[in-house]
């Protein structure tokens, strides 16, 4: 069964540094998402992306964050100047275009981001 | 946006059916209800979704009340591997709540 893959599985970065989290969505999917989960807390929506633009974003997704689909397979989340509170699991998800965005999302296993 | 309400936690004996309720009284007529689960710190996993008819797949059954104000996810024979946090969310509502922590007891 096709999967969403995320790399790296664990990223350790110094505070203030830029970090890029990478995701390869399922190949025929056209809706892409990023979520984060701080340890012990709930899954929080960050951003959704369709047709090469952001379709929705949460209050968490401020100017520090950006997303990009640099080629036909990757979907990236960039955090420009990391802060301690950015430490979390970051999940990428994708969904099938048939029926619009109201399709089940398929999640990757996440990238654990640790800011020192 | 439609909101959902779920119990914080539930226990279920191994081999018995687990029935997880969800209230979604503000859901609109054409909105599906989706169920996901998260096992430990893994990515959420899609389980099932439905509009107004009951649905069944290899993982679970979904019973939706006639007025669509609530639904119940049924795991017919719970195993220890079903211990997880279960979320019901309407579509286009990308916000996971706190879900129900299901613990399957040997």
Image (tube, helix red, strand yellow):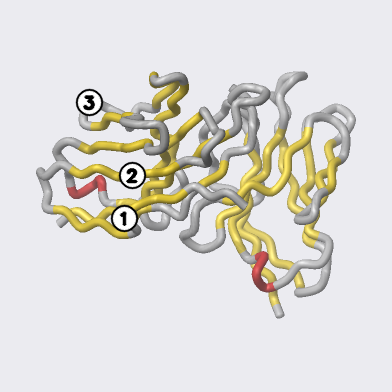
Q: CA distance from mark 1 to mark 3?
A: 23 Å
Residue nearer the viewer, A49 or B38: A49
Labels 2 and 1: the sequence-earlier one: 1
Residue named by callout 2: A22
User: In the figure, is residue B34 to the left or right of B39?
Assistant: right
The residue tagged with tag 2: helix, strand or loop?
A: strand
Q: CA distance from mark 2 to mark 1?
A: 7 Å
Q: Nearer the viewer, mark 1 or mark 3?
A: 1
Residue nearer the viewer, A74 or B14: A74
Q: Nearer the viewer, mark 3 or mark 2?
A: 2
Can residue B8 be seen from the camera position used here? no
Dot 2 surroundings within 10 Å: few (below 14), some, or many (20 or more)?
A: many
Q: Quadrant of residue B81?
A: bottom right
Residue named by callout 1: A8
Q: Quadrant of residue A29?
A: top right
Dot 3 surroundings within 10 Å: few (below 14), some, or many (20 or more)?
A: few
User: In the figure, is residue A31 to the left or right of A97?
Assistant: left
Labels 3 and 2: the sequence-earlier one: 2
Residue named by callout 3: A63
Residue extending furthest bottom? B106
Judge if badges 1 and 3 mark residues of a common chain.
yes
């Amino acid at each position: 069964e096709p999967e969403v893959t995320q790399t790296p599985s664990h990223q350790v970065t110094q505070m203030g540094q830029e970090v890029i989290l990478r995701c390869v969505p399922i190949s025929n999917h056209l809706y892409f998402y990023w979520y984060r989960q701080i340890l012990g807390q709930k899954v929080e929506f960050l951003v959704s992306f369709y047709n090469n633009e952001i379709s929705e974003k949460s209050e968490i997704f401020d100017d520090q964050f950006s997303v990009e689909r640099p080629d036909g397979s990757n979907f990236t989340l960039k955090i420009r100047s990391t802060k301690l509170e950015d430490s979390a699991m970051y999940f990428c998800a994708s969904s099938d275009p048939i029926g619009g965005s109201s399709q089940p999302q398929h999640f990757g296993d996440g990238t654990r981001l640790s800011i020192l | 946006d439609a909101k959902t309400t779920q119990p914080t936690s539930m226990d279920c004996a191994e081999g018995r059916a687990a029935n997880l309720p969800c209230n979604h009284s503000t859901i609109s007529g054409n909105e599906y209800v989706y169920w996901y689960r998260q096992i430990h710190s893994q990515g959420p996993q899609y389980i099932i979704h439905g509009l107004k008819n009951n649905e069944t797949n290899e993982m679970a059954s979904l019973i939706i009340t006639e007025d669509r104000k609530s639904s119940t996810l049924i795991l017919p024979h719970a195993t220890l591997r079903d211990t997880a946090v279960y979320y019901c969310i309407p579509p286009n509502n990308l916000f996971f709540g706190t879900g129900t922590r299901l613990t399957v007891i040997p």
